[in-house]
Image (tube, rainbow, N blue to C red):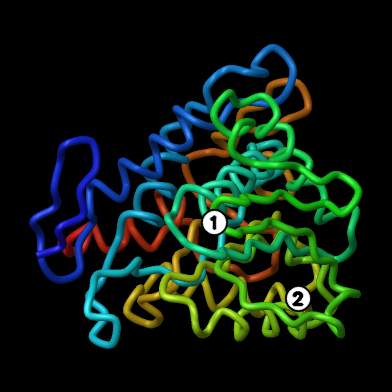
């Protein structure tokens, strides 16, 4: 039996399943601990949009499997690939994930790294997370933001969230519990990605989460990863430990696309800007939606 308990509810399922207490815990951390950081929404609870909650947060943190070596249930997904159109709250979502895996996941000596092409790019998510900490009555009492070194520290568990640009790869000697990889499309090759991925090997429930907008270069590293994750979205059994969410707008408005100001709202179908990306599914492509339609648990 799973046995995970949260808010008075105990999961009694066995085998691969969506553990409701785990999913509830992640959702509650976002909506009760984290806050918005900008404009008129600043300081208000970070209430997840339906698609953020049901298609990303709950399956990503709630799906579990039995680990024979550890003799316990662990999160199913170790790598997540999220493609979003611009202006869809990507930085805020990643900031929540970073803070949750820093202080909400119950891990001692957690190492959360915010990775990107350069320091300025990596600090985009860090700055949102730091602002969340300052504005949250709970997080501001628990965490310490160190601006000059771009770090957030939880001294109680000896855990840290730090910014790591690609040019720091040579001096990296880390054991990540979580890697937040922003805008993979800007990476010239897979060296940085592979270094961070392989560094997670000894962790019980590591997570490498990549969030990116679509790109135009069919020969890029990101294009190769995109193609692989698109195949996984169609056939989750290809890599059961990888989570996929694809939701991009096409390069020009198509039938069903709505615009508010200059920000496009995605139509119900998914379209990516890389050439020859197959047919549009009727919904954003996710590993969870495919498993649900096939009748599997979760």
Residue closer to the observer: 69 or 86: 69
Residue farthest to the front, as pictured:
156
Q: Quadrant of the C terminus?
A: bottom left
Say left or right for 41 vs 290: right
Residue at screen point 59% across, 38% down: 142
Mark 1 in CB contact with mark 2 (< 8 angstroms): no
Q: Can you tell which of label 1 and label 2 is closer to the viewer?
A: 1
The image shows residue 146, relative to residue 203, as above or below, that is above
* Circle nearer the N terminus (1, 2): 1
Say left or right for 100 vs 194: left
Q: Quadrant of the N terminus?
A: bottom left
Q: Which label was assigned to residue 157?
A: 1
Residue 21 x/y as whole percent: 24, 46
Say left or right for 143 vs 115: left
Does dot 1 land on a helix, a strand or a loop? loop
Badge 2 is on which residue? Answer: 218
Residue at screen point 61% across, 56% down: 83
Residue 54 x/y as whole percent: 36, 42
Residue closer to the observer: 255 or 219: 219
Within the image, what quadrant is residue 271 found in?
bottom right
């Amino acid at each position: 039996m799973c046995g995970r308990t949260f808010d008075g509810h105990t999961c009694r399922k066995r085998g691969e399943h969506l553990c409701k207490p785990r999913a509830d815990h992640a959702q509650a951390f976002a909506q009760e601990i984290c806050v918005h950081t900008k404009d008129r929404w600043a300081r208000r609870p970070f209430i997840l949009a339906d698609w953020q909650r049901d298609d990303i947060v709950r399956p990503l943190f709630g799906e579990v499997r039995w680990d024979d070596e550890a003799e316990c249930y662990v999160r199913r997904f170790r790598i997540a690939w999220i493609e979003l159109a611009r202006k869809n709250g990507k930085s805020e979502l990643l900031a929540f994930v970073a803070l949750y895996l820093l202080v909400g996941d119950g891990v001692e000596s957690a190492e959360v790294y915010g990775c990107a092409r350069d320091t300025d790019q990596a600090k985009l998510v860090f700055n949102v997370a730091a602002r969340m900490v300052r504005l949250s009555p709970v997080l501001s009492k628990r965490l310490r933001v160190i601006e000059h070194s771009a770090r957030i520290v939880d001294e109680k568990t000896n855990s840290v969230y730090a910014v790591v640009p690609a040019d720091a790869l040579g001096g990296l000697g880390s054991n990540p519990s979580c890697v937040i990889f922003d805008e993979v499309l800007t990476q010239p090759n897979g060296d940085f990605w592979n270094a961070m991925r392989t560094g997670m090997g000894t962790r019980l429930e590591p997570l490498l989460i990549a969030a990116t907008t679509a790109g135009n270069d069919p020969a890029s590293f990101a294009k190769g990863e995109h193609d692989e994750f698109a195949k996984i979205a169609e056939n989750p059994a290809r890599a059961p430990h990888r989570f996929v969410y694809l939701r991009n707008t096409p390069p020009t408005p198509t039938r069903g696309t709505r615009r508010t100001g200059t920000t496009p709202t995605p139509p119900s179908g998914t379209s990516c800007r890389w050439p020859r990306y197959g047919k549009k599914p009727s919904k954003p492509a996710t590993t969870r939606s495919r498993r649900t339609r096939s009748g599997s648990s979760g």
